[in-house]
Image (cartoon, helix red, strand yellow):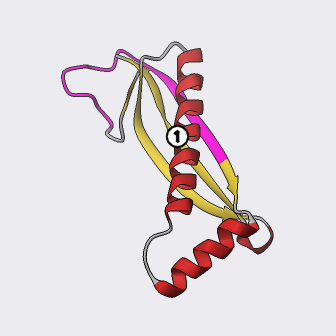
Amino acid sequence: MLMTTTTALEGKPVSRYLGVVTGEAIIGANIFRDLFAGVRDIVGGRSATYERGLAEAREVAMKEMEARAQELGANAVIGIDLDYEVLGKGNGMLMVSVSGTAVVC
């Protein structure tokens, strides 16, 4: 399935708009991950653990959105928007949400 942040696909005119589709994923930060990220913050550098968690959450959300688009009969999703939000007590969880327009090209 074609998926893009742009509102059009070059050379592929949209023949039908099927509606907005979404996907969400929420990941929790456990105490060990927080501890090591805290150490990384003190000494500097990137937190590979958090980066992997974000990438995994983003992939889950994108796949969920793609599945919803397929259920509608779409062969593409355009205008994709990704959002990140912290949730929960002490901001201990991260939500990745994606949305786009399911279309037939």
Q: Which residue is mark 1?
A: 59
In the rendered image, which quarter is residue 72 located in? top right
Q: Give left or right: position of 103 versus 12.
A: right
Task: Check the image and report above or below for 99 versus 105.
Answer: below
Residue sitting at 59 percent across and 16 percent down? Answer: 71
Q: Give the position of the N terminus as an image quadrant.
A: top left
- Picture coordinates of residue 30 (x, y %)? 74, 63
Task: Check the image and report above or below for 95 versus 103.
Answer: below
Amino acid bearing label 1: Glu
Task: Check the image and report above or below for 51 versus 63.
Answer: below
Does the segment drawn in magenta span residue 69? no
- Picture coordinates of residue 31 (x, y %)? 75, 69
Nearer-the-camera pick, 94 or 75:
94
Residue sitting at 65 percent across and 45 percent down? Answer: 25
Task: Check the image and report above or below for 99 versus 1.
Answer: below
Q: Give left or right: position of 10 versus 4.
A: left
Count of marks overlaid on the render: 1
**Residue lying farthest right?**
89
- Picture coordinates of residue 24 (x, y %)? 63, 43
Q: Give left or right: position of 32 versus 80.
A: right
Nearer-the-camera pick, 62 or 101:
62
Crowding near pointer 1: few (<14 within 10 Å), some, many (20+)? some
Residue sitting at 52 percent across and 53 percent down? Answer: 52
**Residue lying farthest bottom?**
42
Name the element at disc 1.
helix
- Picture coordinates of residue 68 (x, y %)? 59, 24
Does the segment drawn in magenta span residue 20? yes
What are the residue bounds of the magenta stretch?
7-25
Q: Give the position of the C terminus as an image quadrant.
A: top left
Nearer-the-camera pick, 8 or 24:
24
